[in-house]
Each structure stands twice: as C-alpha cells, then as structure tokens.
Image (cartoon, rainbow, N blue to C red):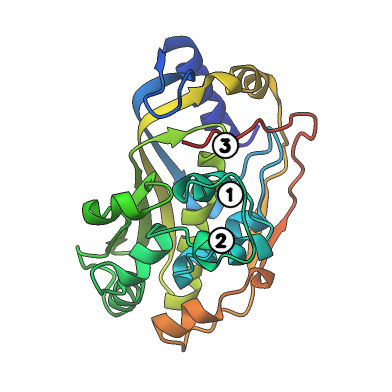
Amino acid sequence: MLNYDIEYRYALHKILHTGYEYLDPNRKGVKRKELGFLHLKFKADVGYPILTLRRVPFKNAVSELILFLKGVTDIREYWKQGIKFWDQDVLNFHNLESFDLAVEHQFDMGKIYAYQYRKLQGMDQIDEVFTNFKKNPMRTDLVVTAWNPTDLKNMCLKPCHHLFQIVGENDGFNIVFNMKGVDLVLGFPVNIQHYYLLGKILEQWSGYRFKYLVANLNKVHIYDNQYELAEQLINSEGSEVQPNLQIQNIDNTLSAFDLVESLDKSMFTLHNYFPDEKLKPVKMLAY
C-alpha cells in the first residue's frame, strides 16, 4: 500500500475509534467525530499525494487551485471547469434556493481564498511572496494567509486551509499549510493536492528543490453521513502503483504575476492513477 493511503487510513481509524463525537455547531442535527489535531509530513519526491482507496478528482483540484491563484470569485468560472461543490455555499450566502442566470450579483462567491490571495487589504500576496521566494527562499516571511477577520462575514465560506508558508532550507524548500478545521473524507483529499501542486509549480519555476509537504491540521473530523464510507476506506486496499504528476510548459523566465496568468489545467497530467472504483463519495454538507 502507498504511504499516503497508509497515513490516511491511520487518521480515519484514529478518529473513528478514539475521537470524540458532538453536534456540529454549524450544521443543525449533524454529528461529527473529531480529533483536536494531526500533523502529517510527506516527501515531495515519492509521488503525487492522491488517494487510491477511492477515486478523488484530480483535474478539479488543479482547476480550483489555478482559479484561487488568479483571484477568481465568480462561481460561473468554477462551473466552466466542472467544479460544483461551492454551489450550496454561494446560494446560502445570497439567501437563494436556486441561481437566476439573469441576476449578476448572485454569482459572487464573496471574499474567499481567491480574493484574499490577490487583494487582501490592497495587497497581491501571491505576486509578492512568489517574487520574494525566487529572489531569496531563505526569507522567513514567505507566508500567504486567507484569514482576514474583517472579511469573514463577506465570504460564502470561511477558509479551512487558512495559511501556507514556503519554508526554505539550504538544499530546497518545503510547503507547510495550516487548516483550522478538516473534513477528512471529502475536503482534505483535494486540499492536499492544492499544496503539492503549488510546490511543484514553484519548483519548476524557481529551480529550487521541493522537499516536503507538511500539513498542520486542527479539528480533524468525519461527519455522521461519512461514518460508513470511512469504515469502507479503512478496509480498502487501494493501489500498489504510485501515481505521478507531470507538469509541462512552466516558463522559468516569467515574473510571478505572469507565471500565475500562464497556468492552465492542460499543463498538468496525472499518470498511473488506479484507484478503487467501488467506493463512492457522499454528499458534502454545506453550512
């Protein structure tokens, strides 16, 4: 079994069998089992961290990351990439039951990750941090945050993965990301792809070696509608073949701004992905 699958199964088992259960404060009538925190660390050169215990979307993860990096907050752009899991949060944000294609403002997702990355208090965090990283990866301020307390009420969903840091060492760099709350079954398998993809993009663009992906996870939980699937995942064997990522056409002469603008999902290919096809995802629970 692959290392990521092993770590993931261990986390599921620990939550199901030693976690505490309580009523979710944001979702009426929904219970969840939880651990206060987990710390995970993966070598970046052993392969792409995608579950093979069940099929997890790859191209959606790529597209969502690119839209975040480009600062896109119009849900119609996410629809164009086949991304639908923001829909209920956006409807709730605008107090709607369904979208009316003639009403422009209802497609605004609010000041979510994408807005904070590119416009937090008038600052383009992505451009500044990426530029500084390429000039000097040993800086201690290579931090990007999506957690802006003054804007939380203006987001369709508060950020779960709220901060990441590029941590330089003498022989490369690491990506360390922090999550204030973790939906381990549905959310995390996509979130971890975002930061591995980010590390690989920066590796090709900068020439510095991407060493480790580190996840600091708080309030790691499984919802009650996921308990059965979580048990099935624990018993799934997954694949023995390591999936691998290929990225084409990263131009290392571009500025940080132009690098982000150049990104397209067609540049990213996943090889040797053979997941267990028997297990199906459950419904994502919106606020």
User: What percent of the width, then of the height, locates residue 34?
Assistant: 41, 21
Q: From the viewer's perspective, tell me whether residue 218 is left or right of residue 43.
A: left
Q: Give the CA separation, mark 3 to mark 2.
A: 20 Å
Type of the residue with mark 2: Ile
Q: Quadrant of residue 280?
A: top right
Type of the residue with mark 1: Asp
Q: Residue at x 62, y 54 (%)?
A: 99
Establish if 115 lies above or below 146. Answer: below
Q: Residues within 10 Å of mark 1 (few under 14, many from 20)?
A: many
Type of the residue with mark 3: Leu
In front: 78, or 272?
A: 78
**Discs 3/2, front:** 2
Q: Give the CA separation, mark 1 to mark 3.
A: 15 Å
Q: Secondary structure at mark 1?
A: helix
Mark on residue 186? 3
User: To which residue does mark 2 refer?
Assistant: 75
**Marks 3 and 2, the one that precedes in the sequence:** 2
Q: Residue at x 55, y 81 (%)?
A: 262
In front: 202, or 69?
A: 69
Q: Secondary structure at mark 3?
A: loop
Q: Give the CA separation, mark 1 to mark 2.
A: 8 Å
**Discs 1/3, front:** 1
